[in-house]
């Protein structure tokens, strides 16, 4: 079977596509042949877009959301309430909450969750920056919006213990989300309800 695998540039593209979420061998083969038969300018536009996300996108200086500037569009928005801070694991969780359209505060992206078994300790996340941000003052409420999984819950508990002495009110999303479901797959109404029904940690 291995002998029939494409090699060279075609094999390399299929291999790279196969690393993407939801793309199996059949899909990577189909996409590869779609690109091979496509207009050169369209394929190069895709290549440019891929290069751009690597070269231009980086974490926001303040909240670690993804941005091309110094500050992300949320930190730079004067209409957002900087006294309410929502803590999420990943920028994609932030994007889900933004799609729900029910939140007007700001965020802090942890860039992951604590996973001791995988060697992900507090030093691998942006927890120090979060504590520093809280200590600078001006924040009244912190909403823990990590995923309702074992590791997400453990991360929320760790962070809230760290911030317990800060005098800031700490809340968490209501358990409207089915246990184990991740924020990025929850629908907008579920997320809006979870935000609305948040309770003290
Ligand atoms: Zn930001």
Image (cartoon, rainbow, N blue to C red):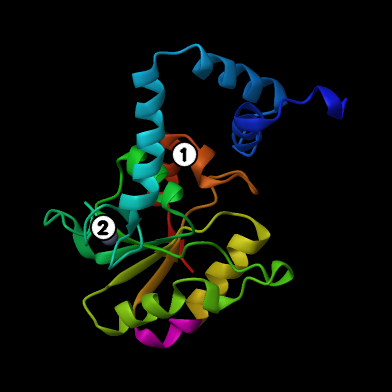
Q: Nearer the viewer, mark 2 or mark 1?
A: 2
The residue wearing badge 2 is 105
Of residue 195 and residue 120, the one placed in the foreground of this image is: 120
Examine the residues drawn in magenta and state their main secondary structure: helix
- State the residue at coordinates (22%, 60%): 71
- Magenta segment boundaries in residue numbering: 162-167
The disc, 2 or 1, on the residue closer to the chain's N-terminal end is 2
Query: Could one spot residue 81 in this view of the protein?
Result: yes
**What x and y, as percent, mark residue 44?**
38, 27
Helix or strand or loop: what does disc 1 sit on? helix
Of residue 50 and residue 24, the one placed in the foreground of this image is: 50
Q: Is residue 179 above or below residue 160?
A: above
Q: Residue furthest bottom?
A: 165
The numbered disc on residue 147 is none
Density class for disc 2 (Cα within 10 Å; few <14, some 14-19, many ≥20) is: some
Q: Is residue 131 above or below residue 178?
A: below
**What x and y, as percent, mark residue 174?**
49, 53
Q: Quadrant of residue 115?
A: bottom right
Helix or strand or loop: what does disc 2 sit on? strand
| CA distance for labels 2 and 1 | 18 Å
Q: Are marks 2 and 1 in contact (CB under 8 Å)?
A: no
**What x and y, as percent, mark residue 58?**
34, 57
**What x and y, as percent, mark residue 180?**
65, 48
The residue wearing badge 1 is 190
Q: Residue furthest right?
A: 1
């Amino acid at each position: 079977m291995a002998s029939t695998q494409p090699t060279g540039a075609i094999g390399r593209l299929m291999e790279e596509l196969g690393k993407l979420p939801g793309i199996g061998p059949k899909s990577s083969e189909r996409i590869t042949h779609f690109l091979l038969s496509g207009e050169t300018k369209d394929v190069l536009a895709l290549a440019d877009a891929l290069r751009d996300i690597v070269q231009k996108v980086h974490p926001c200086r303040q909240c670690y959301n993804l941005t091309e500037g110094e500050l992300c569009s949320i930190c730079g928005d004067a209409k957002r309430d900087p006294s309410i801070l929502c803590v999420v694991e990943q920028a994609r969780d932030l994007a889900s909450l933004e799609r729900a359209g029910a939140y007007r505060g700001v965020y802090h992206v942890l860039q992951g969750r604590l996973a001791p078994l995988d060697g992900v300790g507090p030093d691998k996340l942006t927890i120090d920056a979060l504590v520093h941000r809280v200590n600078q003052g001006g924040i009244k409420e912190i909403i823990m919006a990590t995923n309702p999984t074992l590791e997400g819950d453990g991360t929320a508990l760790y962070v809230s213990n760290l911030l317990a002495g800060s005098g800031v009110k700490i809340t968490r999303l209501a358990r409207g989300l089915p246990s184990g479901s991740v924020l990025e797959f929850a629908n907008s109404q579920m997320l809006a309800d979870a935000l609305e029904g948040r309770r003290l940690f």
